[in-house]
Image (tube, grey):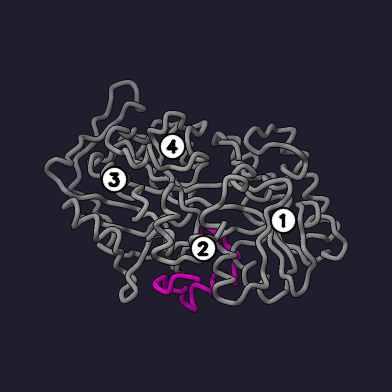
């Protein structure tokens, strides 16, 4: 069941979701109307940090002077509602409090990342100029993480100082093409993109083509407004691998998607508002995020089913990264290693309900919530993980081109 310590969205925030249909990463984790929600410590200070050493010729070599030996602190930026909270005070995070007790390192935790592109736009000029962004740790999704790693705007880890990470990270998250040596990005949480249907109003669906073509679902289907998720699943339905997508593959997938739109099969493109429509039966089936379905079932019953399509699932991760100008690298390495302790990882997973990236956390979850320990959307088995696919990392120009074409199909 859903962890009772996790606070529900306010009526105002839910109204924004219903009205706008913004993406999972804009509102899934609790973006409040009007701006970011600051969990603790206030906004990060804009001064008092040591400047990075700006290289004379190679900006990729930019690195902050590590003051960890004398400054026991970390400035940590994350998405809203993406960490454990105290049952009596949702501004307190037991895992962070325990880390401080254990290490003496104080963590200023700020929930100020609401969208990958928005956050990138906020910090890119400083990172490009090798200037401090007043953060020692930030959480970005695979595709954006790969971009900042490729630009040289992230400090590498010392793997000898994060043995829990190198030992316990899931096999499917190791040696990713954009971080083959596992020295730049440590997954925070992961999730699936698959299919879902309401068993009260629709028969079982098994394939992506069921969703896009089955006559009994016509006009009752929703697909996602995030390009990589929707086009990724369409590519899988065509036998194409999103991890190696070419321009020709992408164009063909868009044509297939456009056909389903023009025929009336697809009712709409949605963000998280599909949750309410699906639970009520206003839509019969849709593309869906795994964490959403756990929440629907916990709150409203089990009539909504998550489906692993026969063609496969999209897999995404949000990653811990140390900005190049950051000045507390060694402190952050201790934090990363701490969160890769299975006992700690289980506590976080019990609150956020996404795929836990830490081996051994499933056994630890047995002590917290045995039902969660057997939930395949939090602890998927090897057979399920073997069916997952990431979307290829795109250059900035490719991302603009692909996104513009996708937006034209969805009519945005």
Q: Provide residue 307's location: percent of width, then percent of height.
A: 68, 58
User: Could you give the CA–CA distance between mark 2 and mark 1, rounded to whole angstroms?
Assistant: 23 Å
Residue at mark 1 = 411
In terms of image quadrants, where is residue 253? top right
**Image point (60%, 35%), residue name:** 398
Which residues lie in the magenta part?
1-26
Q: Nearer the viewer, mark 2 or mark 1?
A: 2
Q: Nearer the viewer, residue 393 or 114?
A: 393
Mark 4 against mark 2, which lies toward the viewer? 2
Tell me if residue 10 comes above or below residue 102 in the rendering: below
2 or 1: tag closer to the N-terminus: 2
* Element under disc 3: loop
Which class describes the residues within 10 Å of circle 3: few (<14), some (14-19), or many (20+)?
many
Which label was assigned to residue 28? 2
Q: Disc 4 to disc 2, how far (Cα)?
A: 23 Å
**Mark on residue 136?**
3
Front residue of 327/121: it is: 327
Answer left or right for 259 relative to 12: right
* Mark number displayed over residue 148: 4
Instruction: Answer with mark 3 or mark 2, whichever residue precedes in sequence.
Output: 2
Q: Residue furthest left?
A: 70
Q: Position of residue 257 (x, y in %)?
A: 77, 49
Question: Where does the image place residue 238, in percent across and percent down from the top left?
Answer: 78, 41
User: Element under label 2?
Assistant: helix
Q: Residue shown at 32%/36% (left/top)? A: 324
Residue 345 vertical placement versus 8 (above, below): above
For residue 365, which quarter of the picture? bottom left
Asked whether the viewer can see residue 380, the reply is: yes
């Amino acid at each position: 069941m859903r962890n009772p310590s996790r606070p529900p969205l306010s009526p105002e925030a839910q109204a924004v979701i219903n009205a706008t249909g913004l993406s999972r990463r804009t509102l899934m984790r609790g973006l409040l109307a009007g701006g970011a929600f600051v969990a603790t410590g206030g906004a990060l200070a804009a001064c008092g940090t040591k400047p990075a050493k700006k290289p004379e010729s190679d900006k990729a070599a930019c690195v902050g002077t590590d003051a960890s030996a004398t400054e026991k602190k970390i400035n940590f930026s994350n998405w809203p509602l993406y960490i454990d909270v105290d049952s009596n005070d949702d501004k307190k995070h037991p895992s962070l409090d325990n880390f401080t007790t254990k290490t003496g390192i104080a963590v200023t935790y700020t929930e100020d990342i609401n969208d990958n592109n928005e956050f990138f736009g906020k910090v890119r000029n400083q990172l490009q100029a090798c200037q401090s962004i007043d953060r020692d740790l930030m959480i970005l999704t695979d595709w954006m993480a790969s971009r900042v790693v490729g630009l040289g705007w992230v400090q590498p880890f010392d793997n000898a100082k994060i043995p829990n990470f190198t030992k316990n990270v899931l096999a499917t998250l190791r040696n990713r093409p954009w971080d083959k040596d596992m020295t730049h990005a440590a997954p925070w949480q992961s999730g699936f993109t698959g299919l879902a249907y309401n068993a009260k109003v629709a028969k079982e669906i098994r394939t992506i083509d069921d969703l896009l073509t089955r006559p009994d679902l016509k006009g009752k289907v929703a697909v996602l407004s995030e390009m990589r998720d929707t086009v990724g699943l369409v590519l899988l339905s065509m036998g194409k691998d999103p991890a190696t997508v070419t321009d020709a593959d992408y164009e063909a997938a868009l044509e297939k998607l456009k056909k389903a739109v023009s025929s009336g099969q697809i009712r709409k493109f949605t963000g998280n508002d599909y949750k309410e429509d699906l639970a009520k039966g206003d839509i019969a089936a849709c593309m869906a995020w795994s964490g959403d379905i756990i929440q629907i079932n916990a709150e409203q019953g089990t009539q909504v089913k998550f489906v692993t399509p026969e063609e496969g699932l999209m897999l995404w991760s949000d990653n811990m990264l140390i900005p190049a100008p950051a000045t507390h690298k060694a402190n952050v390495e201790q934090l990363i290693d701490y969160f890769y302790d299975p006992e700690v990882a289980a506590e976080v997973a019990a609150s956020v309900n996404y795929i836990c990236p830490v081996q051994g956390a499933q056994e630890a979850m047995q002590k917290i919530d045995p039902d969660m320990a057997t939930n395949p959307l939090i602890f998927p088995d090897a057979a399920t993980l073997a069916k997952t696919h990431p979307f290829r990392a795109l250059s900035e120009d490719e991302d603009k081109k692909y996104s513009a074409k996708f937006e034209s199909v969805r009519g945005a």
